[in-house]
Amino acid sequence: MPNKIKIHLADDHQVLIDGMLAVLKTNSKFEVVGHSLNGLDLVKTVKENKADILIMDINMPHKDGIEVLKEFSVSGYTCRVIILSSYNDLKLIKEVLKLGATGYLSKECAGESIVEAIEVVASGREYFSKNIQDKIFSSFSGNHALASNQDLHISNVLTERELEILKLISLEYSGKEIGEELFISANTVESHRKNLIKKLNVKNTIGLVKYAIKNNLIKQ
C-alpha cells in the first residue's frame, strides 16, 4: 500500500479546519498529521510532524502566511504549500509564488477543490483554483500588460515572438487563433508552445504564466 500524503492544516478559524478535516478524513490517500490556529505554532509543529503538504491561510495571528513562507525560505525547510485564502489580489499571488507556494486555492472553492488541489500538488505540479487562474490570465489584458520589450530583452531568455505567443496562450487563445493573430501556421504556433515549455522548464500553460509572474514580466 503506497504511503499516505501527510497534510498539515493552518487557519485561524477552527470551524474551517473542522470542515477540511471532515472532507480529508474520508479519503484513504490522505493523513492529516496536525493543524494550527496561528503562524507561530505552525512553524514549530509542521516541522515536527514532517508533513508533505501544508494548507495555509495567509491571515493568521502571531505570524501570517507571508512570514511563515519567508521563514521556510531562510531555514531551507521544504514542504509543498497550498495557500487557502479569501484574497485574490494579483500582487499577493505573485508574492507567495515567489516565496515558494505551489498552489493557491480560494476559500470559496475549497470545499469542491481541496482534494484535487492536494493530489495535483502532491504529484509535483502547481494548482490554482479557477477564479485565481482567471485573475492571472486577466493580468495580460486591460491595465495589466507584459513589461516593455526593452526590459524583457535584458533577460535574454525569450524572443519577441515567444513573448507574443506567451501572451496569447495566457489569454487562452487556441493555436488556430494565435496563428491568425500573428499570421503564422498552427503548426508553427505549436512548435513555439513546445519550445516555450521546454525552454522555461514548465509542464503546462499555468507553468508558463507562473514563469511570467515570478520574473516580473507582468506589470501591476
Image: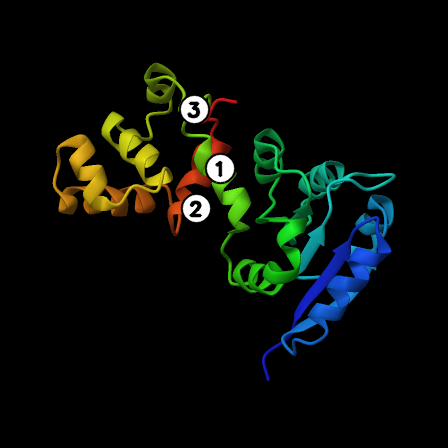
| Image point (63%, 33%), residue name | 92
10 Å neighbourhood of mark 2: few (<14), some, or many (≥20)? some
| Image point (41%, 30%), residue name | 140
Instruction: Examine the image and state in which quarter residue 63 appears.
Output: top right
Asked if labels 3 and 2 touch by Cβ distance under 8 angstroms, the answer is no
Is 173 left or right of 114, judged from the image as shown?
Answer: left
| Image point (69%, 45%), residue name | 85
Reading the image, the residue beneath label 3 is 142
- The percent coordinates of residue 149 (x first, y second) are 33, 18
N-term-proximal mark, 1 vs 3: 1
10 Å neighbourhood of mark 3: few (<14), some, or many (≥20)? few
Which part of the image, by quadrant, shows the N terminus? bottom right
User: Does residue 38 lie above or below 29 as drawn?
Assistant: above
Instruction: Give the secondary structure at mark 1.
Output: helix
Instruction: Give the secondary structure at mark 3.
Output: loop
Q: Which mark is residue 206?
A: 2
- The percent coordinates of residue 53 (x first, y second) are 66, 59
Q: Which mark is residue 136?
A: 1
Asked if labels 1 and 2 touch by Cβ distance under 8 angstroms, the answer is yes
Of residues 172 and 53, which is closer to you in this image? 172
User: What is the CA distance from the residue labelled 2 to the residue labelled 1?
Assistant: 9 Å
The type of residue carrying mark 1 is Ile
